[in-house]
Image (spheres, helix red, strand yellow):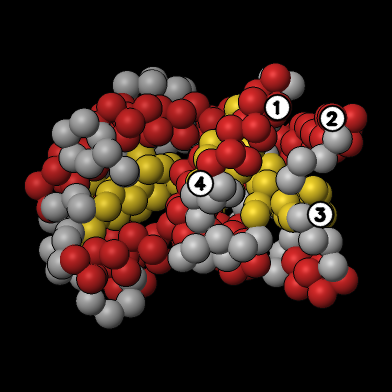
Amino acid sequence: MRILLVEDAKSVVQVMTARLSSYGHEVVHAENGKVAVDRFEAASPDLVLMDIEMPVMNGFEASHCIRQLEAHKQWAWTPIIFLTSSDTVENLVTAIEAGGDDFMAKFAPEPVLKAKMKAMARIAAMRQSLSIANKKLQSLADQDGLTGLANRRSMDTKVDAIWQNAASTASAFSILMIDIDNFKKYNDHYGHQSGDDCLRHVAQALDCAVAHANTCITRDAFTARYGGEEFAVIIPGGSDGPARMLAQSLVETVRNLSIPHQMNAQWGIVTISVGGASVEKPEGPVKVAFRLADARLYQAKNLGRNCAVAA
């Protein structure tokens, strides 16, 4: 385990560090409560051993701040054991109210300390497993099940934050709306299973093209499934010129897949239409940019499909 030891007495620190290290644990030291809060955020410990009486900020105050950090950042709960030489009822109640979980004497007998650390190690292992499971669940909740791209809910959440940041920093924002041409006819002709395969191939191609272009336009552009056969590419900080180049590149990327589509007019292969909008100084609601990109997508459709209108 990684243990954050919060203690101002050097003699206690030396003894506790030596004992905990002999059990195979990593010890990070903080000399007072204020430093402990900073170290907690940086070190992400599995356990906090907290002294009560310290300068600058006492253990109860530090424990309260740590619990606020966990709530704000949605971290998993971290056990806090108070180190004390006076386990009074008043101290116990105050400790629990401040977010602590247990009391332990600073110089607890070897069997007691070792047993408590074994119990805490089991909790740390369970916390790690829970954290991994939560991350997987979050990933599944944010992904479109068919294509693996960001889903609409995830995209909307990210876009709101990106738009607000762009507005506050007066930085550019670009969006590309993408639609697979005559996709209903594709489904009707080839069947829905082939339609799903087509969506996956197109999604992968778009995502790879955006990832490749990120070195030129922005490091943060991403592709999302907007719904049905529609996709969106969000380009934080992307200006008009690079967005237009990317839009045209996406049209060519899908065209080069050469997926047969006999019902797609004169093309005979799967193609896409792209509409783009770039806002140099965002203001007002982000839906204005979406509406503009959507209008240009329909312009691309009216021009015969298999093209981009992003200027």
Instruction: Estimate the spatial distance between the alpha carbons at disc 1 and disc 4, rounded to whole Å.
Output: 17 Å
What residue does disc 2 label?
Answer: 110
What residue does disc 1 label?
Answer: 19
Mark 3 or mark 2: whose residue is earlier in sequence: 3
Quadrant placement of the N terminus: top right
Instruction: Answer few, some or many: residues within 10 Å of disc 4's Cα (few below 14, many 20 plus, some between 14 and 19).
Output: many
Q: Residue at the spot x=15%, y=67% of the render? A: 170
Mark 4 or mark 2: whose residue is earlier in sequence: 4
Query: Of all residues shown, which one is farthest toward the left?
Result: 241
Q: Where is residue 195 in the image (x, y as percent from the top left)?
A: 59, 34
Instruction: Estimate the spatial distance between the alpha carbons at disc 3 and disc 1, rounded to whole Å.
Output: 18 Å
Q: Residue at the spot x=57%, y=65% of the render? A: 58
Residue 306 versus residue 48: which sits nearer the camera?
Answer: 48
Any mark on residue 224, and which?
none
- The kind of residue on which mark 4 rests is Ala
Any mark on residue 103, and which?
3
- The kind of residue on which mark 2 rests is Glu
Q: Position of residue 12 (x, y in %)?
A: 63, 41
